[in-house]
Image: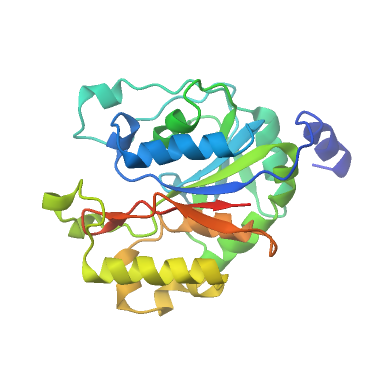
Amino acid sequence: MNLNDLSKISDNFRTTEKMPVLFLGHGSPMNAIEENIFVQGFRNISKEIPKPNAIICISAHWFTNGTFVTAMEMPKTIHDFYGFPKELFDVQYPAKGSPELAKETAGLLAPVLVEEDHNWGLDHGAWSVLRHLYPDADIPVIQLSIDYTKPPQYHFDLAKKLSKLREKGILIIGSGNIVHNLRLIDWKNIDTVGAGWDWAIEAREKTNNWLLEGDFQKLIDYQKQGSFLQYAVPTPDHFLPMIYNLGLKEKSEELSFFNDALIGGSLSMTSLRIG
């Protein structure tokens, strides 16, 4: 893609003030259909930011060998889970895609090879939260996959290349969970807001402090920070979407929290707004 082509694609999206960036702790798929303080938090944040021209979502649930971007006109709603009630499987989120934005995203990330995908769609890391932010599904959405072969620093640096899209009304969302250890869930307290094992409490406190202090390198190097983060982040899939968001933060921008609570002992719903 040459610069002239990139400029033409950018013209499809009106220039705006720089859009905020969101990281959403999405938690259980059941949040898509339940009423609780967390879905209220998702609704509230959408009222506090400008309505976007389009959305790019980096979801914990599209973890790939290589980097892909959804490029279909109408992405399907993917029910990538099992053991939940039929009501959840019945949910559809019929947002349009944006082949134009997919091409622009791929172009901005060069020389990294980003392949256009026509098979994936919107997984529950995307639609389970978007249906609360934008219930009318009237905003085009694409997903950018996470290359599991690359380290956190790579993802942090890659995200910086997407920065100019924020000035075209593009809302970039990371969807995962900072503390996410399904093997150690306290099922008796799965719906108890504030319930956390000692290591989860420590992980939430320290990661929050590093986020507020702008000490992102400790988060990028999370595997070196001690056993509390080894328990909190046993696999990188739910953690890396936040790293993308941090890569987009400008030094002058404010970072703030919402939905900042532990549940079930080993999950955090902590969500971030940047800008």
Q: Position of residue 123 (x, y in %)?
A: 42, 35
- On screen, residue 43 above or below 203: above
Q: Position of residue 274 (x, y in %)?
A: 59, 53
Which picture quadrant has residue 2? Answer: top right
- On screen, residue 180 above or below 168: below
Which picture quadrant has residue 38? Answer: top left
Which residue occupies 56% across, 21% down? 138
Q: Residue furthest left?
A: 188
Which picture quadrant has residue 234? Answer: bottom left
Task: Answer whether residue 209 is visible to the viewer in this image.
Answer: yes
- On screen, residue 54 above or below 163: above
Nearest the viewer among 199 and 3 is 199
Which residue occupies 30% across, 20% down? 90
Image side of residue 247 versus residue 83, left or right? right
Which residue occupies 40% across, 60% down? 236
Q: Position of residue 23 (x, y in %)?
A: 50, 50
Which residue occupies 36% across, 65% down? 204
Nearest the viewer among 167 and 121 is 167
Image side of residue 35 versus residue 213, left or right? left
Nearest the viewer among 206 and 184 is 206
Q: Position of residue 94 (x, y in %)?
A: 48, 20
